[in-house]
């Protein structure tokens, strides 16, 4: 076991850990980043599969994600807009396919009115409650004790409106059934994106991508830090701590430091053993933040054939196997790429199938939106973060029903010299790369005494 010393040891080389390392290095602090995988970037992962570049993890940036946009700019990287010229496709619960333009799904007048009313209601709640401390709202306990599914049905008797609004947070963001997370959690998601209106606006929320892929942001930060600082294939197993410092151990390395930042997703906090054990509060609430599950479907075709049909590639269907599909053609490529999402129970069902049946069912689901040409991709691949030991789900973690108001107030508290940072406990940019950059930087600044 080799032994090293630095000022701050960081566990995890995702965008949170690397943003923290970068900020601390700028202030002249000695830093070591220990990363379990053989690559940096965590849940951002740009990979070539059969010669085709896919964004297996996080990729989109919205205009309000200014911390990430500033970082991308500082690193000298370019962004480009998602292709969205043309009409979208909506598939109703009865299977009816409608081509439409504009923001609102082409549903009947009453469902449309109800959807607009629910969006307005959620906008008001998001504006009043905000992303910083949703647990402080006077009705926080009440909103955290009812599932988003049941809350929607308390507000409206229109089942289709409830299902469509539920999709934006359940399948679309938290990737858990709407019965399993609270209305308060849904409001936090909306507040962190600026408003519920922003969440339902794919032009806003899925605005831009990074040329060369989102992982390149982390790769470049790691290159700037250098391999003396960022150590790969170093899964942290144990943290020994006292009020004055930490000793962090992997299988073959021990790093002593004044402070540590645990920059791993909250569902993995308990995979590390702490000596002495963390206080009762952390031991309890670290069990109540769990990952959602989504399959990100990638399919590349010789051409973006849907554009010839006047379609932009966007499709929605809250009751379908693939609930959302978008044109995900990479910058400068002639071949066309689609990305689709299959979440929670539908993802379970897909992983239970053999590979050939799974592929057939998923391609048929894409074809429902964009026609039979979708059945025959040149390259087809499914992101499988659920099988990744150092993530265990996708996109991010959220609390059980009732957990956000009960434990949220403590989630950012350090324990002695141990700080916890993750996009999943960020306020603005919650569950997104932007939140990772914000909380990584803010945690470093707290250590530097620049932030309370
Ligand atoms: P992570 O990226 O998870 O990084 C944590 C790091 O810690 C990992 O590298 C991991 O290997 C390491 N680690 C874990 N345990 C240990 C240990 N014991 N020892 C050492 N290292 C350890 N966000 C967006 O903004 N836009 C999107 O379009 C988007 N889409 C997404 C699609 C998918 C499929 C997924 C999975 C995520 C998506 N996200 C998106 C979310 C975004 O990727 C995350 O919010 C972001 O990567 C979180 O950064 P992080 O550094 O906090 O955590």
Image (cartoon, grey):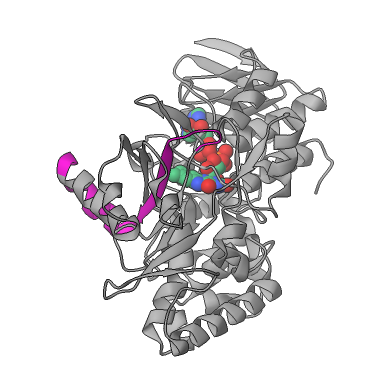
Identified at 64% across, 52% down, the residue is: 62
* Count of numbered circles in the view: 0
Q: Where is residue 1 shown, x and y percent of the image?
A: 49, 10
Relative to 88, does residue 49 appear above or below in the rendering?
Answer: above
Q: Residue at x 52, y 42 (%)?
A: 58
Q: Nearer the viewer, residue 283 or 260?
A: 260
Q: x%, y% of residue 354?
A: 15, 42
Q: Position of residue 8 (x, y in %)?
A: 69, 27
User: Nearest the camera: 342 or 26?
Assistant: 342
Q: Is residue 279 above or below residue 390?
A: below
Q: Which residues are magenta?
A: 330-356
Magenta-drawn stretch contains 338:
yes
Q: Does residue 230 sit above or below 119 in this rendering?
A: above
173 inside magenta stretch: no
- Residue 433 image-quadrant placement: top right
Judge from the rendering whether residue 433 lies leftward or rightward of residue 182; answer left or right: right
- Where 119 sits versus 75, above or below? below
Spot the residue most to the front.
308
Q: Percent x, y for residue 25?
A: 76, 24
Which quadrant of the figure has residue 420? top right
Q: Is residue 410 visible?
A: yes
Q: Is residue 50 left or right of residue 3?
A: left
């Amino acid at each position: 076991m080799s032994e090293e010393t630095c000022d701050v040891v960081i566990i995890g080389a995702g965008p949170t850990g690397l943003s923290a390392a970068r900020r601390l290095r700028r202030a002249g602090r000695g830093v070591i980043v220990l990363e379990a995988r053989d690559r940096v970037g965590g849940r951002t992962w740009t990979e070539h599969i059969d010669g085709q570049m896919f964004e297996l993890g996080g990729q989109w940036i919205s205009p309000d994600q200014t911390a990430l946009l500033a970082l991308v700019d500082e690193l000298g990287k370019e962004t480009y807009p998602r292709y969205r010229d043309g009409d979208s496709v909506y598939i109703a619960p009865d299977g009816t396919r409608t081509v439409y333009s504009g923001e609102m799904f082409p549903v009947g007048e009453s469902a449309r009115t109800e959807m607009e009313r629910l969006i307005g209601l959620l906008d008001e709640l998001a504006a009043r409650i905000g992303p910083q401390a949703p647990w402080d709202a006077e009705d926080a306990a009440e909103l955290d004790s009812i599932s988003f599914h049941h809350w929607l049905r308390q507000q409206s008797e229109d089942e289709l409106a409830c299902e469509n609004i539920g999709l934006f947070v359940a399948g679309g963001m938290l990737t858990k059934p709407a019965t399993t997370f609270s209305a308060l959690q849904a409001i936090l998601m909306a507040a962190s994106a600026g408003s519920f209106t922003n969440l339902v606006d794919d032009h806003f929320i899925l605005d831009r991508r990074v040329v060369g892929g989102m992982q390149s942001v982390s790769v470049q930060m790691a290159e700037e830090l250098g391999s003396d600082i960022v150590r790969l294939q170093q899964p942290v197993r144990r943290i020994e701590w006292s009020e004055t410092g930490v000793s962090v151990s992997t299988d073959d390395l021990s790093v002593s430091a004044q402070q540590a930042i645990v920059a791993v997703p909250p569902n993995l906090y308990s995979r590390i053993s702490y000596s002495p054990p963390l206080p009762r509060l952390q031991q309890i609430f670290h069990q109540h933040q769990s990952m959602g599950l989504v399959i990100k479907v990638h399919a590349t075709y010789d051409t973006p054939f849907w554009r010839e049909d006047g379609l932009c590639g966007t499709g929605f269907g809250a009751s379908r196997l693939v609930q959302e599909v978008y044109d995900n053609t990479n910058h400068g490529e002639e071949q066309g790429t689609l990305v689709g999402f299959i979440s929670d129970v539908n993802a379970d069902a897909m992983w239970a199938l053999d590979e050939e049946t799974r592929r057939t069912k998923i391609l048929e689901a894409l074809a429902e939106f964009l026609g039979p040409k979708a059945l025959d991709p040149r390259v087809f691949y499914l992101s499988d973060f659920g099988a990744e030991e150092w993530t265990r789900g996708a996109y991010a973690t959220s609390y059980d029903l009732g957990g956000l108001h009960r434990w949220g107030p403590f989630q950012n508290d350090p324990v002695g010299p141990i700080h916890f940072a993750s996009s999943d406990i960020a306020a603005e940019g919650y569950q997104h790369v932007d939140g990772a950059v914000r909380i990584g930087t803010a945690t470093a600044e707290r250590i530097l005494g620049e932030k309370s």
